[in-house]
Amino acid sequence: MRHRINTLFYCIHKNFVINGTRKYAGHSKWQNIKHTKQEQDAARSKVFKSIISKMMIAVKEVGEIDPRKNSRLANLIDEAKKANMPASTLNSFLERIKNPEEGARTHIVPVRIPSGCTFILHIASNNYPAVRINLRTIYKKFNAKNIDSALSMFDCASYIIATKDCNYDQAMEDAIEVEAEDVEELKDNDKTYYKFRSEFLFSDKTKTRLMSLGYSIISIEDTCIPNCVVELSDEEIENVNKFKNKLSEIKEIKKIEDNLA
């Protein structure tokens, strides 16, 4: 059973603006030191960006992300350490090339084919132009088109399923506090879960706030549910399935939703 939260606009904003000027002895000296430091930081940043760029080329050309098997990458890692690149910066880059999908930008693409069936493609990629090239090839074969306005035909939201040792009334108060749009209580045998609805594609803030209130996050999913569905003939459904199978060959497409009955 779904429970709606009728009042979600509970928030208190306190803004403190302090305006004023104070003069300090040695202010000119501080400005000179600050200027010198900014120049040094800019120079270091330029060196770091150059090394990281070379690392990306080394990985791409050699085709190996393990420094033990890629001597060029290993040498560049040593160069980064000698240049005093912060360990956090170096480790973050190495982790990113090991898991390229992490941090990939999400793209939501509505597509329609002549039968009237509309699809919502959930794409995760840091190179969307390359994905679009592959999509255009498939679109041409099935006479499909991107129609941005079609997204309004779906109820889109991000859902966070979480657990906490509390009752529904407390979960509803927590939903108001984290500015969730809705909360639903789910039962699975003797376990209770709470499903929070948050703004589509922007669940991070809600997730962080829920965790600060003691919730354990089970899953997060971006979902588009059709407001109405279309019924197709067997021949049209067969064509829809062929279209979806072709789309599934693009690895960057993580999920395909539609308004098929």
Image (tube, rainbow, N blue to C red):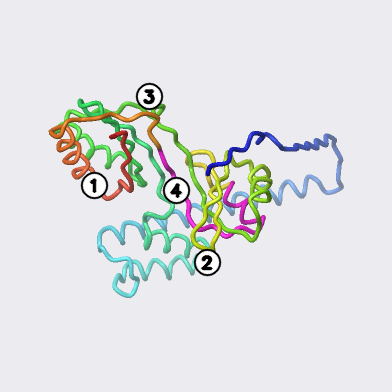
Q: Which residues are magenta?
A: 206-224
User: Which of the 4 image quadrants contains residue 217?
Assistant: bottom right
Amino acid on which the number 2 mark rests in the picture:
Ala
Return the disc, 2 or 1, that comes first in the chain's sequence: 2
Q: Nearer the viewer, residue 120 or 129?
A: 120
Which circle's residue, 2 or 3, is located before the other in the chain?
A: 2
Q: Residues within 10 Å of mark 4 (few under 14, many from 20)?
A: some
Work out whether mark 1 precedes mark 4 in sequence or the reverse, and give the earlier one.
4
Callout 4: helix, strand or loop? strand
CA–CA distance between discs 1 and 4?
19 Å
Which sits in the foreground, 235 or 16?
Answer: 235
Q: Amino acid at mark 3?
A: Ser
Of the residues tagged 4 and 3, which is closer to the observer? 4
| Mark sitting on residue 248 | 1
Given this view, does label 2 or label 4 mark the residue nearer the observer? 4
The residue under label 4 is 221
Give above or below for 116 relative to 61: above
The Cα atoms of the two marked residues, 2 and 3, are separated by 45 Å
Q: What residue is shown with label 2? A: 87
Number of callouts: 4
Query: Residue 99 appears at what percent x and percent y?
Result: 38, 60
Label located before the other in sequence (2 or 4): 2
Tell me if residue 260 is in the magenta stretch. Answer: no
Quarter-wise, where is residue 117 in the image?
A: top left
According to the image, label 3 marks what residue? Answer: 149
Instruction: Give the mark, 4 or 3, whose residue is nearer the N terminus.
Output: 3
Q: Amino acid at mark 4?
A: Glu
Q: x, y (%) of residue 120? A: 33, 36
Q: CA distance from mark 4 to mark 3?
A: 22 Å
